[in-house]
Amino acid sequence: MNKEQIIMVGTSLTSPGGMTAVVETYRKMGLFDVYNIEYLSTYERPNIITQIKVYSKALTSLFLSLIGKKIHLIHVHSASRGSFWRKSIICALARLFNVPYIFHLHSGEFSVFYHNECKKWGKFWVRQTLRHAQCVIALTEQWRSILTEIEPKAKIQIVYNPVFVPSQLPAYKPQKPNILFLGRLRQPKGVYDLLDALPPLLKIIPELSLILGGDGEIEQVHVYAEKLGIKKAVNTLGWIDGKEKEQILAQASILVLPSYFEGLPICIIEAMAQGIPVVATNVGGISDIISDGYNGILVEPGNIEELAKALSRLLLDEELCKKMSLNAYKTAQDKFATEPIMNQLGKIYKNHL
């Protein structure tokens, strides 16, 4: 097994994003060492010259390895749009050289991309890419259904995103109330809805703060918060990961993700592993892991009143928070621990080498 080379393809591990966080967890849990995986980056940052250099280098390296018959399996991590087009060319090269590939989809906007943005030829190319994969990895049951509708002949398996789950539930420590958001600051993530929901909460809980951990439209968020008169309650950190993210999570009262599109958000799973109650929108695969009222609260995207009500419900009810904290932790233990997911990926690799 160790002599057989697997190439894993995705975004640079220095780039921010949930996909990077998942791959980095794979690396830390030992997947790369056990299965002889070499990582190939096809994207680094949104600069056209850098993109061309990084992608050209990746294609050249892959092509030479394929010619030399050094690759036995390719595991491709893809989002939508540019990410898909880049990865689909790699999948086409794999088909050309008769090398099996796994197509691992992370994007919550893939259905919108396929149905609303792809022309006829684009839809054909999407279906071809999915159909000829030895395995298409979907993040949840909901996403398996969506992908089956797009390409019924795709061979789909569900593999959850892994996180490191502590051996016991972190101690619940009531503290100055705060709401944590992790993700790119932009409208599809619902960050402006979250800002709109904050003023009525501050009337009830004046000491409440909103912590935004993510890159994106930071300046626009500051302007909007000032317009709403809540700028003092809003703290933007930029993109955070590693120890800094662990520290911020440890101090969070609630994690909130009011997105309009999602796959399986890694920030929700990370919060659940720490026993942090979650308020999220009922989109993508979120309802496959959050049971409303049990381990979190689900709201409809764009419903600011419902979002504010869910947040206030948790902030004002310590016993409910404790109950959801325990149930979130149990869910993370049962579904997202690294060892069973590593074993599942290992079986997929062995079946297709």
Image: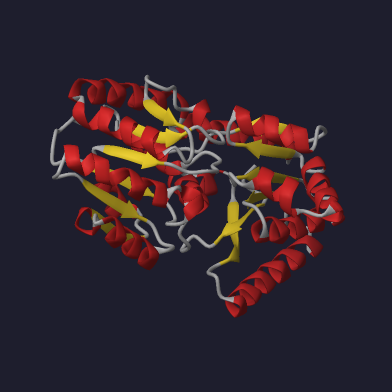
Q: Can you say whether 122 is above or below 286 in the image?
A: below
| Quadrant in the picture for residue 159 | top right
Left or right for 333, reference 207: right
Q: Position of residue 39 (x, y in %)?
A: 58, 58
Q: For the point 58% across and 31% down, which residue is it? A: 140
**In the orientation shown, which residue stands out farthest toward the bottom?**
49
Q: Quadrant of the C terminus?
A: top right
| Quadrant in the picture for residue 168 | top left
Q: Position of residue 183 (x, y in %)?
A: 42, 51
Q: Quadrant of the N terminus?
A: top right
Q: Position of residue 141 (x, y in %)?
A: 61, 27
Q: Is residue 141 visible?
A: yes
| Camera-side residue of 134 and 246 | 246
| Camera-side residue of 289 and 337 | 289
Q: Position of residue 86 (x, y in %)?
A: 70, 61
Q: Can you say whether 74 is above or below 257 in the image?
A: below
Left or right for 84, reference 277: right
Q: For the point 61% across and 73% down, which residue is it? A: 51
Q: Can you say whether 185 is above or below 28 in the image?
A: below
Q: How is the image coloured?
A: secondary structure
Q: For the point 56% across and 75% down, which residue is it? A: 47
Left or right for 15, reference 114: left
| Camera-side residue of 349 and 193 | 193
| Camera-side residue of 64 and 113 | 113
| Quadrant in the picture for residue 62 | bottom right
Number of dots carrying numbers: 0
Q: Is residue 349 visible?
A: no
Q: For the point 52% across and 50% down, which residue is it? A: 19
